[in-house]
Structures are given as structure tokens and as C-alpha cells.
Image (cartoon, rainbow, N blue to C red):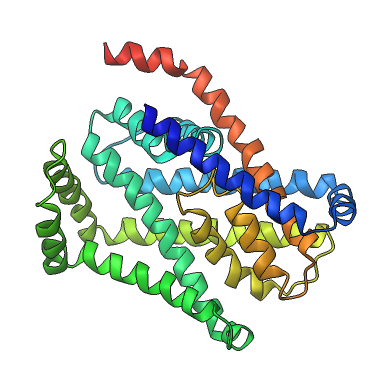
């Protein structure tokens, strides 16, 4: 518990420090003018659109689960949003993916299936993100040539491909397991092996993989379009292609477990990237903070579902 609290405090501190320097280097009156100029009807439309995107994400999860268990979609919808709630409001104490896996385990009684399905859900989404980035790089490389960004994209795409090879190619996976076998911590080797056996069952499920990937393309593409809609609402004049190039990169950067829900890290990346392609620093910062606010508002649905399903008391009762 002490380690978790320390980790949370460190991440909160990182977010505060980065945001402090960002706000210190912008023109606050201009920033505030940008914030108050936002069309609230546009924000409401983006919120509704984002809820639809998350509903498709929950549907993708139901597709992935078809192989092993049958869980009603309304139940998965609730669990998915509960995971979002924990990601946004308690990200440093209990990760949203852990919560999703736990609630699915309560419904299915299959811990291995729960873990594998949560992983596949994330993996499918990130695969779509990498594809979008790779395609956007074809016309967009000329715009970033001569900067340090090609190396960042190479690291992102190369790291994903290498990880994928280790996961899906038997010989490489065996090599990785041999390394992990030297780690003996709370039976982690046996748990990884059980999880991997379930995960490998998806290699023969071509239909499921394709359907889930198509959902992921809609989800990731929809998020990028939503960002672009918001950017137009605050007067940003940045070409759509840059959003398909930069949003995947900023998403990956914000996943680094060094801050509170990526807060601060994501905003710094937005200011650095979009201020180079026509946006002001104030606009870039406003866009990133608006998106954080929208995801937080939408994830309140998960908080409501968490309370409706009994919250901590229900979880404790089921463990007795």
C-alpha cells in the first residue's frame, strides 16, 4: 500500500510540474480567451460521439470474448465504462484494465480468459493505431524530415512490431519465457503460461480478429476525427493529416506510467507537436485539456455504473 501511495504521489507531482512549466510559458489571457471561445454545442456533440466510440469499443470486447464465454453486451458496456472511470479518476491506485478484468472474472469465473480478452482488446486497438500512423507517415514524412520525429515514429512502430513477434511467434516467445523463468515471484511464470495458452487460441480465430480490428479502426479513427472537430471549434488551422500523424504518437506517449492519466505529458506533447504546424501553444494546450475533460465527463458513466453494481461492498461480498 505504501508503494502504491508513493507511486501515486510521484505521478501527481510529475503532472503538476509539467503543467506548471507549460502554463508559465504561455500567454494566459490568450489561453483563457481560447477556452471561453469554445462552442458548447460542439463539445456536446463530441461528447455524444465519444460515447458512441466507447460503445463500439465495448462491442469489440464482446467479439473478442465470443471464443470462450458469453457475456451480455449491457454487462460488458457497464464494465468497460467502469474501467474508464478508474483510468481517469484512480489511475495510479488500480488500473482500469485490472478493474475490467476483475469484473469480467466475477461474471465468467475465468481469470485466464478475462486477462487474455483485456489484452486482446488493447492489442487490437493499438494495432489499428499503428496502422493509421504508418499510413499517415507515407504522405507526412516530408513534413517531419530533418527533425527528431522520424526516430520517435520508428521507435513506436518498431517496438510494436518487435513485441508482436515475441508474442505471436512461438520460437521468440519461448526465448522470452526462458528469460522470465528466471523470475520466481508469486508464481508469475505459471500465470503467464496459462494466460499465453488462452491468448494463442486467438491465432485460429481469423473472423474474430478481423471483426475486432475493423472495430478498432473505427474507434481510433473516430477519436482522431473528434480531436479535429474540437480543433476547428477553437480556431486551429492545422491540416487533418497532422492529426492522423500526431494523435497516435501523443496517445502512445501519454500511456507512459509516469504521470496522472498522462496529464501533463500529453499536454506537453501537444504543445510541442502542434505548435510546429500552425497552432499556437495556447490552442494546442486548450485542445489537449479539452479532450482530457471530455474523457473525464464521459467516464462518469462508469462511476455511476460502479455504484449501481454495488461498488466496493459488492466486490467484498463476492470474495467472502
Identify which residue is drawn at 65% across, 73% down: 242
Q: Position of residue 122 (x, y in %)?
A: 40, 52
- Quarter of the rendering occupied by the C terminus: top left
Count of numbered marks: 0
Taking the image as shown, residue 301 lies to the left or right of residue 115, namely right
Taking the image as shown, residue 165 lies to the left or right of residue 14, namely left
Taking the image as shown, residue 163 lies to the left or right of residue 250, namely left
The relative height of residue 61 versus residue 282 in the rendered view (above or below) is above
Q: Position of residue 287 (x, y in %)?
A: 73, 56
Whether residue 80 can be seen here: no
Identify which residue is drawn at 48% across, 75% down: 153
Q: Position of residue 67 (x, y in %)?
A: 26, 46
Whether residue 305 can be seen here: yes
Task: Find residue 124 and report its image quarter.
Answer: bottom left
**Residue nearest the observer in this picture, 143 or 181:** 181
The relative height of residue 117 versus residue 237 in the rendered view (above or below) is above
The relative height of residue 74 versus residue 141 in the rendered view (above or below) is above
Q: Position of residue 10 (x, y in %)?
A: 49, 41
Taking the image as shown, residue 95 lies to the left or right of residue 173, namely right
Identify which residue is drawn at 22% across, 65% down: 166
- Quarter of the rendering occupied by the N terminus: top left
**Residue nearest the observer in this picture, 197 or 188:** 188
**Residue nearest the observer in this picture, 143 or 168:** 143
Amino acid at each position: 500500500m505504501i508503494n502504491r501511495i508513493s507511486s501515486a504521489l510521484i505521478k501527481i507531482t510529475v503532472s503538476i510540474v509539467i503543467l506548471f512549466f507549460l502554463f508559465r510559458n504561455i500567454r494566459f489571457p490568450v489561453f483563457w480567451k481560447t477556452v471561453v471561445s469554445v462552442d458548447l454545442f460542439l463539445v456536446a456533440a463530441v461528447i455524444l460521439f465519444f460515447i458512441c466510440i466507447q460503445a463500439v469499443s465495448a462491442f469489440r470486447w464482446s467479439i473478442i470474448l465470443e471464443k470462450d464465454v458469453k457475456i451480455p453486451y449491457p454487462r460488458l458496456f457497464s464494465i468497460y465504462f467502469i474501467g474508464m472511470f478508474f483510468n481517469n479518476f484512480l489511475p495510479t491506485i488500480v488500473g482500469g484494465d485490472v478493474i475490467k478484468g476483475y469484473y469480467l472474472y466475477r461474471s465468467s469465473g475465468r481469470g485466464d480468459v478475462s486477462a487474455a480478452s483485456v489484452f486482446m482488446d488493447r492489442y487490437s486497438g493499438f494495432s489499428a493505431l499503428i496502422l493509421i500512423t504508418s499510413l499517415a507517415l507515407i504522405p507526412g514524412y516530408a513534413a517531419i524530415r530533418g527533425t527528431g520525429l522520424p526516430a520517435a515514429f520508428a521507435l513506436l512502430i518498431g517496438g510494436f512490431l518487435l513485441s508482436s513477434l515475441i508474442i505471436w511467434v512461438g520460437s521468440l516467445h519461448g526465448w522470452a519465457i526462458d528469460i522470465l523463468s528466471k523470475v520466481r515471484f508469486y508464481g508469475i511464470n505459471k500465470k503467464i503460461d496459462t494466460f499465453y495458452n488462452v491468448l494463442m487460441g486467438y491465432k485460429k480465430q481469423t473472423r474474430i480478429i478481423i471483426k475486432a480490428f475493423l472495430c478498432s479502426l473505427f474507434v481510433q479513427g473516430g477519436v482522431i476525427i473528434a480531436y479535429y472537430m474540437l480543433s476547428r471549434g477553437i480556431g486551429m488551422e492545422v491540416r487533418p493529416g497532422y492529426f492522423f500523424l500526431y494523435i497516435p504518437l501523443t496517445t502512445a506517449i501519454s500511456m507512459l506510467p509516469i504521470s496522472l492519466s498522462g496529464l501533463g505529458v500529453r499536454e506537453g506533447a501537444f504543445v510541442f507537436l502542434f505548435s510546429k504546424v500552425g497552432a499556437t501553444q495556447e490552442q494546442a494546450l486548450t485542445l489537449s485539456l479539452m479532450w482530457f475533460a471530455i474523457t473525464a465527463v464521459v467516464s462518469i458513466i462508469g462511476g455511476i455504473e460502479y455504484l449501481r453494481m454495488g461498488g466496493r461492498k459488492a466486490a467484498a461480498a463476492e470474495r467472502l
